[in-house]
Amino acid sequence: MKVAFLCGAGISIPAGMPTTREVTEQVLSGAGVARHTSMTYYFGQPMYAHMGWDDEYVPKVCGFLAILKAECDRFFNVNGSDEEKRSWWEHFGKHETNYEDLYYLAAQVHDSEVGEHENPAIQPLIKKILASEELGKVLDMRLRGPNRKLDFSDLHLEACNYIECVVWSMLSRTPNDLESLRLFAELWADDSVEKIDVYTLNHDTVLEQFCAARGIALTHGFGAPVNLVKYWTPALLNDDEQRMRLLKLHGSVNWFQFPSHGEDWSSRYVGIPLDHDLWHTKDRKVDRQWPSTGRPKMLIGTSNKLMSYTTGIFADLHFRFYRNMAEADALVVCGYGFGDKGINTRLLEWVSSSPERRAVVIDPGLEELQWTARGAVRRSWKEVKESGKLVLMDMGIEEAHWAEVRRALRLSA
């Protein structure tokens, strides 16, 4: 018997990780964040604080993000009667602007401005922003610092870098309750389950820490350390001897890209520095190497993620997601809000490809989830549920037990 798990941010919240709303509030406020010369942002005092100078980047980047948020809010926020709201939600879903939306919009502006992607639809928005009084105020900010002038051509890229760094920092915090993931220990103890594939959209390492603490052998595709760096080795995920595999489909806070020096394809040189010092690692020849950027390999945003699913390490991961799901006998979805179009497509294809396939959704807010899920899932929800192929468990992961989930899936011993 082969069981697949798909996990979202909801499984990490009981362990003490921040919610999407908390990350968004921090991104918009910029409180306590400063920029380093490495083009990364960190929590702490500005570099020139000892001279009485402010950070000149964060206030302007946050001002730019406030402009983008206003545009998002105009679309997502709907006023009117309950009937009018319900009609809107049926078409577009119920949604609150979050940092993923802001990143997607900033990335679209950047890609269009630098000619990366031709996008005629975004040009009217760019012209509107350029002509706005709000942008003028952002660009005219006078802060005490080394007088680094920021113009519009800087802001969209800096906004993306800034969001990545804030997400990285906030999701790198130490969890305070690993026992909230005991469901995975109960699953591991079930000898009748021969294969466990866990697909997660989380960037944090909470699940890896839980498995290490419980002695659960988890294969995540990174090989034995070479000079204190574990490198991406996807062939490890093909090992039939490995019972539990973890595929982080959106990347991780501890994955960093290192130069390949023309030796091999780039994904091989994604590594996990074991001493957490990404700036002073040694390559296979014991020469010092620097990361390609100071930020981890993570996919952030909404629809823009789809374009990365066919590149580098993410191509390896999503190929195995596609292939391995075909072999799964049952699916458990936990803590996922059904907000990723690519992932949703794969799930709907899986559940509809055989009359025997069943899925369990574990979530403490199922009533709300039906409205916040993206269109394809939202429209299919009632039909799949009534067919008996979808079982709903209204609880958080910390309340769930494998015996109950197994009964819901109608799995035989």
Image (cartoon, helix red, strand yellow):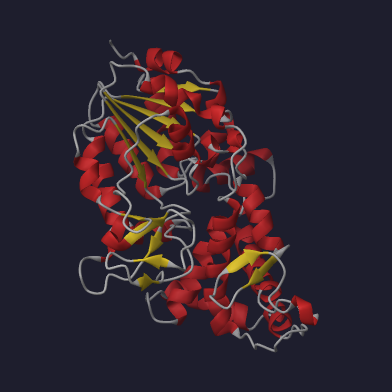
Residue 182: where, in percent of width, then height? 49, 24
- Residue 75: image quadrant is bottom right
Q: Is 91 located above or below residue 12 in the figure?
A: below
327 vs 273, left or right, is left
Q: Please name whichever residue, 353 or 408, is drawn nearer the observer in this view of the structure.
A: 408
304 and 177: which is toward the camera:
177
Tell me residue 60's x, y (percent): 68, 76
Q: Residue at x 48, y 18 (%)?
A: 401
* Position above or below: 406 against 309: above
Q: Nearer the viewer, residue 16 or 307?
A: 16
Q: Is residue 398 above or below residue 312?
A: above
Residue at the far top in the pictured view: 413
Relative to 10, say whether 160 is above or below. below
Is residue 21 shown to the viewer in this render?
yes
Q: Quadrant of residue 265?
A: bottom left
Residue 395 visible, this orientation: no
The furthest residue to the right: 52
Identify which residue is drawn at 68% across, 62% down: 28
- The residue lying at 50 percent from left, 74 percent from top is 109
Number of marks in picture:
0
In this rendering, would 12 be left or right of 222?
right
Question: x%, y% of residue 45?
Answer: 72, 69
Viewer-closest of 258 and 171: 258
Q: Quadrant of the N terminus?
A: top left
> How far from the left and from the top, in percent, is residue 70?
66, 64
Quarter of the image with the C terminus is top left
